[in-house]
Image (cartoon, helix red, strand yellow):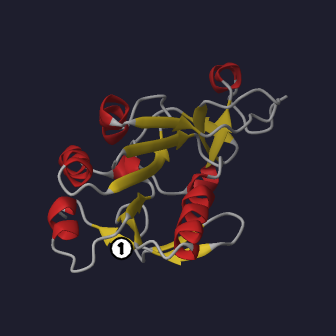
Amino acid sequence: MAKLYFYYSTMNAGKTTLLLQHKYKNDEKNFETIILIPYIANKDGLIISRIGIKKQAIILLKHTNIFKYIKNLKKKPKHILIDEVQFLAKKQIYEIICIVDILHISVFTYGLRTDFKSQLFNATKYLFSFADKIVEIKTICNCGKKAIMNAKFNNNKKIVHGNQIDINKKSYIPLCRYHYYNTTKLNFK
C-alpha cells in the first residue's frame, strides 16, 4: 500500500543524508526510485549531503505538475523521494497526494518544519495534515538539548526579520527553544 511520508527537522539534522541512504538501499534492491527537488532549493539538481554523498535529482519548478510528470513516465518508480519539500507550492502537495492515492506510489518527503522566524512553511503545514507517517529527525543544540528551532545569523548576530526563504545554509543554526529566544549572538553559552 502506497503512503505519504514526511521526515522533518531543523537544519543540519541529516535529512538529505537519510534521503540519499534511502536511494542507495532502493538501488541495491533494483527498485526504480527518483529524487525530486524544488528549483528554489537547488538550481543544478545535484543533491550533496554534508558528509559528501551526492546524487542527481530532477528539478521541480513552481509550475511543475508533479502528478502529470510521474503519470507520463514510461517506467513508474516504486518510490519518489523529495528533498527540501518545504519549498513546494500548496498545489504540488495535493499533486503528491494524488501520486500516492491514484498512482499507488509511495512518496517520501524531507524538509524543515519551520523557518528562522519559527513560522511553519506552507507546504509543511499541509504535510502535517495529510501525511500517512510523520517522522521527526532529531538534532541537538550547542547546549546539548534537542534542537527544534532554526536560527538565522549574519555577522554573528541573530536575524529575526526578512524573507522566509534565503538559501544560504551556512547562516542557519539549529537551537533549542531556550537558546532560540535567548540568543542574540552566535557565540553563546
Res 103 seen here: yes
Q: List x then y, in percent, for residue 100.
A: 27, 50
Placement of 115 over or under 16, stated as above or below: above
Q: Quadrant of residue 140?
A: top right
Nearest the camera: 25 or 39?
25
Residue at position x 50%, y 43% from top? 7
Write down the residue under mark 1.
58
The image quadrant of residue 139 is top right
Q: Is residue 63 visible?
A: no
- Residue at the extreme right of the image, as rendered: 189
Query: Which amino acid type corresponds to the residue marked 1 in the rendered image?
Result: Ile
Q: Position of residue 102 (x, y in %)?
A: 17, 52
Q: Residues within 10 Å of mark 1 (few under 14, many from 20)?
A: some
126 and 151: which one is in front? 126
Residue 73 rendering spot, x and y as whole percentages:
21, 76
Q: Is residue 116 left or right of residue 5?
A: right
99 vs 170, left or right, is left
Residue lying at 47% horizontally and 35% vertically, measured from the top left: 134
Identify the residue shown where x is 66% and y is 37%.
138
